[in-house]
Amino acid sequence: MSDETVKCPVPWIYPEDLVRDDDPGMGLTPAEIREVQDVLGEALVEQTQRLLADMRSRAEILHPIPADPGEYLTWRLGLSSSQGVHLMSLEAERAVYSRLCRASARGDWATILFAFTKAPGGGQELPGGSAVQPIRDALQARRTALRQQTAKRLGCTCS
């Protein structure tokens, strides 16, 4: 390890903590928001309805799900492998549904954009996301540049 790397204070800071999420540079521009709303508005409604339907059908398969934490743990441990798959899918769908609903209620179109588009390394894209993928890529590039500028201001000696 070189002396420069040891002296650099930034490696000890998680990259997403370098700039606050509410920093104006971390969000979409008004024109981008309008475009994302136009493209994904209907897809957001369809996706949340689809998630609700999927969660209902999985909950019916798993019914009754105990409300008591102790009973729930015992119940969960006794699930068959196929029931376990349904439970894991239900939990994943609930997380996505919750994130989309919270973002929609806040008018957080950046979170919705990220949910519908692919990450640079791959990942899953929801229907309608390909039309706004360039906006995600541009926002991600702006966020990365802002984090790098902040790191440099903090004394980052890395390249």
Image (cartoon, rainbow, N blue to C red):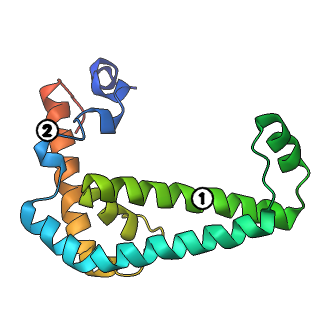
Q: How many marks?
A: 2
Residue hosting label 1: 92
Q: Is residue 129 left or right of residue 36?
A: right
Residue occupying image coordinates x 55% and y 69%? 52
- Above or below, 21 relative to 12: below
Closer to us: 156 or 34? 34
- Above or below, 71 relative to 83: above
Residue occupying image coordinates x 12% and y 47%? 25
Residue hosting label 2: 149
Is there any visible trace of residue 118 in the rendered image?
no
Q: Which mark is residue 104?
A: none
- What amino acid does circle 2 point to? Gln
Q: Quadrant of residue 108?
A: bottom left
Is there any visible trace of residue 51 in the rendered image?
yes
Closer to us: 55 or 17? 55
Q: Earlier in the sequence, mark 2 or mark 1?
A: 1
Indicate the position of residue 30 as horizontal and vertical percent values. 8, 62
- At numbered mark 2, what does the secondary structure look like: helix, strand or loop? helix
- At numbered mark 1, what does the secondary structure look like: helix, strand or loop? helix
- Above or below, 106 relative to 125: above
Residue occupying image coordinates x 79% and y 47%? 66
